[in-house]
Image: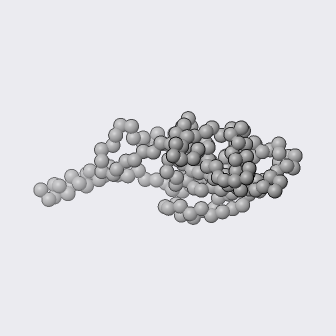
Amino acid sequence: MGKREFERYLKQQSSTAELEIDWDTQKDEWLNQLAQFYKQVEDFLQKYVTSGDISLTYREKTISEDPIGSYPAKEMHIQIKSKKVVLDPIGTNIIGAKGRVDMKGSAGIVKFVLVPKGSALPSVRITIAGQPVLKETQTKEETDSIEWDWKIATPPPRIKYIEVNGDSFFDSLMEVIND
């Protein structure tokens, strides 16, 4: 029984091997999505930058995430007259999202999350190694083909996602600068 039981255990472990995550690719995808988000914000603010009502600058910060390690990322600083707002990238290892950026101002914080396109609410899946895989579990190929979208996450406990567009962005901006 000892050897057969051991061989059955080995076979089970190889059939339920965990999905290997390429953390460098994960980080690169996150930084690419972050750059696209900043481009969208620049487009929203272009009229006001051109008129001189606001200015945009970037500063580098270091993000440390297990198991990715430390890496540089850009913060966007928005100067609106005497008010300052920072778009602070938090990271890619976020429960329920592929990434998060916090918009910080003197009156509070608004959270932007990178979630699957069409998401209206947070969704988390948990799998246990060594347990049978359920049919609804996604394969690596399925997760690689997900289209991502930036959304505004409302505060807990009833978190909802709001589409990021010009109006919702400016509403968020006003929320963090209106003391």
Asked if 170 appears above or below 18 in the picture, the reply is above
Q: Nearer the viewer, residue 55 or 60?
A: 55
Report whether 143 appears left or right of 85. Answer: left
Picture coordinates of residue 170 (x, y %)?
A: 73, 42
Q: Is residue 28 above or below residue 137?
A: below
In the displayed structure image, the side of residue 138 where residue 43 appears, left or right: right
Residue at the (62%, 64%) spot, across then down: 62
Quadrant of residue 140 in the image?
top left
Asked whether residue 32 appears in the rendered view, the answer is no
Q: Residue furthest front?
A: 179
Expressed as whole percent of the image width and height from the top left, the position of residue 46 reads 80, 44
Query: Is residue 165 found left or right of 126 in the rendered image?
Result: right
Residue pictured at 73% horizontal, 52% vertical: 179
Q: Residue furthest top?
A: 118
Query: How far across and down, in percent of the image, does residue 130 sit?
Result: 30, 51
Above or below, comparing residue 75 to residue 123 in the picture: below
The residue closer to the viewer here, 15 or 39, is 39
In the image, 137 versus 124, the foreground residue is 124
Q: Is residue 131 visible?
A: yes
Quadrant for the N terminus, please.
Answer: bottom left
Q: Quadrant of residue 40?
A: top right
Residue farthest right in this picture: 51
Residue located at (16% from left, 58% from top): 3
Q: How many marks?
A: 0
Q: How is the image coloured?
A: one colour
In the image, residue 79 lies at what x, y percent?
79, 55
Q: Residue at x 69, y 62 (%)?
A: 60
